[in-house]
Image (cartoon, helix red, strand yellow):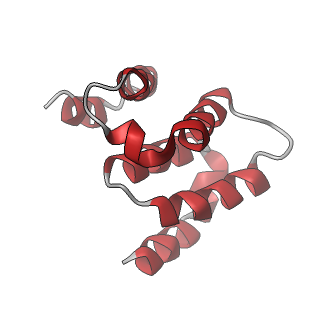
Amino acid sequence: MNQEIIDIITEHSDYIYQDKMALFYCLYFCIYYNNPDIVEFLKTLIQKITSVNKLEKIEKLLELINTNSIERLRTIGEQVNIFVYHLVFYQAVDDELRVVYSQILR
């Protein structure tokens, strides 16, 4: 399954270069679905893509993953968990991704 995900990301690399915030959402879903293997793949990809222009929200999410681990970020009731969900929610609002944040609220 992870190889399929990597293949899809690779297939759509042109889009990712145009809209780097897609990586932000990929990281979020790695947390949500507890997929540390894809997080490692994404970290490498993000380093290559954003080596010149750092993206603050992606960097913040990576910092939270590195500091707290995916498992802790997924734990209900953890303060850092609440911060991650707010970060994603407000990014979705900024991006007008009504479908993403309506799913978060369920």
* Left or right: residue 55 compared with residue 40: right
Of residues 54 and 61, which is closer to you in this image? 61
Q: Percent from the top left, x then y, of residue 2?
A: 43, 74
Tell me the quarter of the picture where residue 100 sits. Answer: top left
* Left or right: residue 69 compared with residue 101: right
Above or below, 92 relative to 48: above
Q: Residue at x 67, y 27 (%)?
A: 56
Q: Percent from the top left, x then y, of residue 78?
A: 34, 26
| Quadrant of the frame with the N terminus | bottom left
Residue extending furthest toward the left: 106
Q: Percent from the top left, x then y, of residue 34?
A: 36, 55
* Left or right: residue 55 compared with residue 12: right
Above or below, 36 relative to 26: below
Total numbered circles: 0
Q: Percent from the top left, x then y, of residue 59?
A: 66, 35
Of residues 81 and 104, which is closer to you in this image? 81
Q: Residue at x 46, y 25 (%)?
A: 91
* Left or right: residue 99 compared with residue 26: left
Of residues 76 and 3, which is closer to you in this image? 76
Of residues 101 and 17, which is closer to you in this image? 101
Q: Residue at x 38, y 20 (%)?
A: 79
Q: Residue at x 63, y 60 (%)?
A: 14
| Quadrant of the frame with the C terminus | top left
Above or below, 28 relative to 1: above
